[in-house]
Amino acid sequence: MDNSSPDSQRKLTLPLYGPARLNYRDQTIRLRRKGLALLYYLALEGPARREQLAALLWDNHRAMGNLRVELHRLRQAWPFGPAPFAAGEDPLRLPDYLALERWDGFLDPNGAERSGKAVRASVMLDGLDDISPEFQDWLEYQRAHQAENHHGMPLRATLLSEVSRLLEPPAVLVLRGPPGSGRKEFAQALARRLELPFSEGLHEVAATKALRYVPLPSPDDALLLSRIQRDRTGVWVVAGSSFGEEPRLVLQLREALPARQVRYLHLPPLSWPEVRRWLKDLPFQEAAALYLQSAGNRLYLDELLSMRAQFGQQPLPVPQRVRAAFYVEARHLTYDARLALERLAVHPGPLPLELVRALGAEAYLDELERRGWLVFENGAWLLDEPSRTLLYEGLQPGRRARYHELAAEAFARQQQHRAEAYHRRTAGLGALAQAEVVAAATLEPGCAVQRRLGLGRELELIDPVLTGPGLPGRRFQPRRGLSHPARAPRHGRSACHPGAAHLSQRSGRLRSG
């Protein structure tokens, strides 16, 4: 093995999410937990003095001696030389070629993607708890900081940087996402980042080395598989919908190619900071309204922008092109499952089992989850916001009101009065219902059932917890102006809305096959 080659060094990574581990060429290097803890601390905090690391990892008088032993074990286990942490080096620092993977994905034990897509590991630095009291404090702070700043929605620029670093020709990227997520645009940006010619389809290109984009379903799976297997210099992006079962071609790629050659990425919605920079010429309130309505879907946002000239600044209707794209995907469901999905769309946020039963959708959970419409997370099911918005807007007013009434009754039985009040108001069951009185009495101090949020700096308004997908746009009036003495709760979270505390989106996570 060539231990000094740039390629070998480029393959040494520390995944931030999922089980804590040091990966070398997609293989895990066996290390003790304290050795891993030391590496992760240096990766996130930068160079640190030996005394600081010893006090962090050991709570005894032999801390410095224990640190020397742990550094020796790390040097012995290092997959290629020269080994880091030379004797006398202080402060300690990681080699430049060791990379921290901030948007990692993970595999189920059987090697299949969970729910047919790459998903984020639920725990950051899993397996490093209870190493020492000092390290545990640091670890909990890091987990809270990462969750607070990212909310599972990495910027496209972050994803591009991650993908371009990990894709080494020959390589295949299986790129999945809902209709309108911008899969082709992402592939074109990736080609520019990799400095490769961009080619779409199966036709030959003049350049031998290129990025070839093939949307699924392919006209000839056998020909495509053969072309990918014979190509030793290029990068292939095989793009398909996140809905439906995994295509046969993807299964064939898993069988025919080495795991290190195939990567999977689920493309997340656009984040608010990205959209705000894109719409920098629009007034803040109008840009925020467009983002909330589109839920970060690129096609939806493009269509709304093209409709502004016709409709002005009034609430814009759902674009026909976007609605049709999602309804084509929904046609692959059975008729009863599609009706169940429409009923579930009345509730923004997590869907507990009691609500699912009340809406008559329990019998269809398996089909909806297997085909990618629902994701189970933290004890409840989730319907991604672009899909939910489009299905909800397509309901006839009478059916919509009846479903809201059923949801209100379900939450009343569970004594979840805030959610009950939301559905009662939306169903037109009375703005002064008893549920609202109870809900107002149980809210955080200073929170009202209806209130204006965001009176303050724009920094408060661009927090994804306030403005991210998951909150109906009509419920909030984002404003810019002088700071208000009564500030909103931390992160601008409103307890007045059933979906306000949960804005999780399917994240962009890149992993090997």
Image (tube, rainbow, N blue to C red):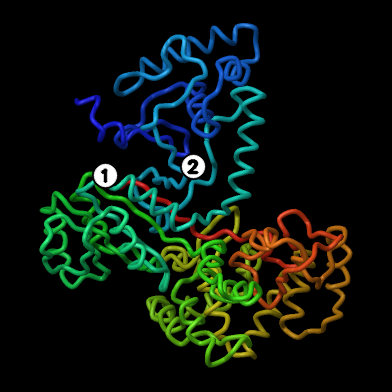
Image quadrant occupied by the N terminus: top left
Type of amino acid at the residue the image marks with label 2: Tyr
Q: Is residue 198 left or right of residue 505?
A: left
Residue found 25% across the figure and 54% down from its top:
172
Which residue, given by chain and number where applicable, does mark 1 sit on? 259
- Secondary structure at numbered mark 2: loop
Which residue, given by chain and number where applicable, does mark 2 sit on? 17
Question: Is 33 situated above or below 115?
Answer: above
Residue closest to the eye, 360 or 158: 158
Question: Is 305 situated above or below 117?
Answer: below
- The answer to whether residue 220 is visible is yes
Residue found 43% across the figure and 41% down from its top:
101
Residue 273, quarter of the rendered image:
bottom right
Type of amino acid at the residue the image marks with label 1: Ala
Asked whether the beta carbons under mark 1 and mark 2 sit within 8 Å of each other, the answer is no
x then y, percent, for residue 282: 58, 76
Seen as rendered, the residue at the extreme front is: 281
x then y, percent, for residue 305: 50, 81
Task: Check disc 2: other Cα within 10 Å, few if <14, some if 14-19, many if 20+.
Answer: many
- Report the number of numbered marks: 2
Task: Check disc 1: other Cα within 10 Å, few if <14, some if 14-19, many if 20+.
Answer: some
Which one is earlier in the sequence, the residue at label 1 or at label 2? Answer: 2
Residue found 53% across the figure and 79% down from its top:
391
Q: Which mark is residue 188?
A: none
Seen as rendered, the residue at the extreme bottom is: 310
Residue closest to the eye, 460 or 513: 460
Residue 472, quarter of the rendered image:
bottom right
Residue found 75% across the figure and 86% down from its top:
428
x then y, percent, for residue 490: 75, 53
For the residues marked 1 and 2, what is the alpha-carbon distance in whole angstroms?
A: 20 Å
